[in-house]
């Protein structure tokens, strides 16, 4: 699940501890332009026992490749081998607007970063002469005093899992080729083949056969029980924000995915309404069918059917959010989902 610390970070960690006992396997720690994720990940490492602690995600423009590798190795050490390095490109509004760095060549940069990180974890002397990263810096740049170095510490693992949050065709193909896990957004099993099938196939063909199959994380909000279908509407504000107002009108990755998932007309309507200031109408324009397909909310039989459909579409790991008025109710939904998953 994605860590939500809107109600306080320490309170959120207390909830993670309870969910860990109820069957939670992975917690994603966000970083957009809020507090940094690694600080929170280190705190989680000290206060959990089993759960994988994943960055969800670290934008690749804000740190050097070697610092990304050092950070993951440090958290892996603190957690006794429970770190996952989640990476992504973020978007131009955040990267250029908050970090002041040009948003260029995200896929090519990610490819180089993965290569550099894995070299650091293997404790090789880092020598990388790529298009976007040159390590050490060439003699004709800087002082000319740089020399190849390797990580001082011995990492707990020499191959820490890398997850990529990717949406576009080239970035998804690269993810399927090189990454250990894929974190898609606005994933619906019924549309997955049409939206991402060719990209995943292209990347898988080039994948190292010695690397484990790609983990595909999808799911949605979770509430298991009778008469809970209205809870699907809770996701309308966030969906309207992403489909309608995340990024510029001409460059909204989430609107593109929503459109390609079979809702092209609705995608345009939602964006028009949202950007005109009518957020409530934009929320209402999201189809009920999409809300059902994008969640695990309903009777146990409905949840079981959705899990089966997702598994047949290639999903082999869940990324969910547990609904409830308090920790006890959210833990109950975690336990219910865990029981259904274990029975499949």
Image (cartoon, grey):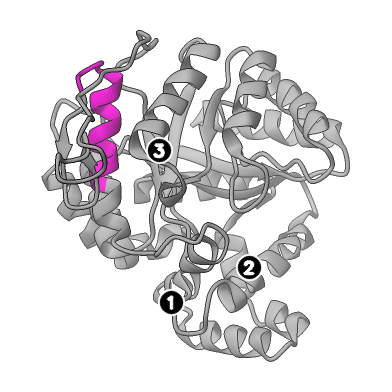
Residue at the (67%, 43%) spot, across then down: 35
Magenta segment main secondary structure:
helix
Q: Which residue is mark 3?
A: 316
Residue at the (69%, 22%) spot, across then down: 22
329 with respect to 206 (left or right): right
Comes first in the chain, label 1 or label 2: 2
322 with respect to 137 (left or right): right
**Residue 6 seen from this side:** yes
Q: Nearer the viewer, residue 220 or 293?
A: 220
Residue 114 magenta: yes
Q: Which residue is mark 2?
A: 239
Span colored in magenta: 111-125
Comes first in the chain, label 3 or label 1: 1
**Residue 215 seen from this side:** no
Where residue 129 appears, as percent x and y from the top left, is 14, 41
Residue at the (66%, 82%) spot, across then down: 285
Q: Which mark is drawn over residue 262?
A: 1
295 with respect to 176 (left or right): right
The picture quadrant where one finds residue 257 is bottom left
Q: Are marks 3 and 1 in contact (CB under 8 Å)?
A: no
The picture quadrant where one finds residue 290 is bottom right
Q: Is residue 141 above or below residue 258?
A: above
């Amino acid at each position: 699940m994605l860590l939500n610390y809107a109600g306080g970070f320490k309170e959120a960690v207390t909830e993670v501890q309870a969910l860990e006992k109820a069957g939670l396997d992975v917690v994603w720690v966000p970083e957009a332009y809020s507090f940094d994720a690694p600080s929170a990940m280190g705190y989680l490492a000290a206060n959990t026992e089993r759960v994988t602690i994943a960055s969800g995600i670290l934008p690749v423009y804000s740190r050097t490749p070697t610092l990304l590798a050092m950070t993951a190795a440090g958290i892996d050490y603190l957690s006794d081998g429970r770190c996952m390095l989640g990476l992504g490109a973020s978007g131009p509004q955040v990267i250029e607007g908050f970090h002041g760095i040009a948003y260029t060549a995200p896929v090519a940069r990610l490819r180089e970063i993965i290569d550099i990180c894995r070299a650091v974890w293997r404790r090789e002397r880092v020598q990388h002469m790529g298009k976007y990263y040159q390590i050490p810096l060439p003699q004709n740049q800087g002082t000319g005093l740089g020399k190849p170095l390797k990580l001082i510490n011995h990492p707990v693992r020499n191959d820490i899992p890398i997850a990529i949050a990717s949406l576009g065709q080239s970035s998804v193909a690269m993810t399927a080729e090189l990454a250990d896990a894929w974190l898609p957004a606005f994933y619906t099993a019924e549309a997955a083949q049409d939206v991402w099938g060719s990209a995943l196939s292209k990347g898988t063909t080039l994948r190292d056969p010695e690397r484990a199959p790609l983990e595909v994380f999808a799911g949605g909000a979770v509430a298991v029980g009778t008469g809970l279908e209205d809870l699907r509407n809770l996701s309308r504000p966030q969906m309207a924000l992403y489909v309608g107002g995340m990024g510029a009108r001409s460059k909204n990755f989430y609107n593109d995915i929503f459109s390609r998932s079979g809702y092209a007309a609705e995608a345009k309507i939602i964006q028009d309404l949202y950007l005109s200031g009518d957020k409530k109408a934009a929320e209402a324009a999201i189809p009920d069918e999409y809300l059902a397909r994008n969640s695990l909310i309903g009777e146990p039989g409905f949840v079981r059917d959705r899990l089966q459909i997702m598994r047949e579409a290639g999903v082999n790991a869940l990324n969910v959010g547990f609904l409830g008025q308090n920790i006890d109710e959210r833990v109950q939904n975690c336990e219910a989902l865990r029981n259904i998953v274990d029975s499949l």
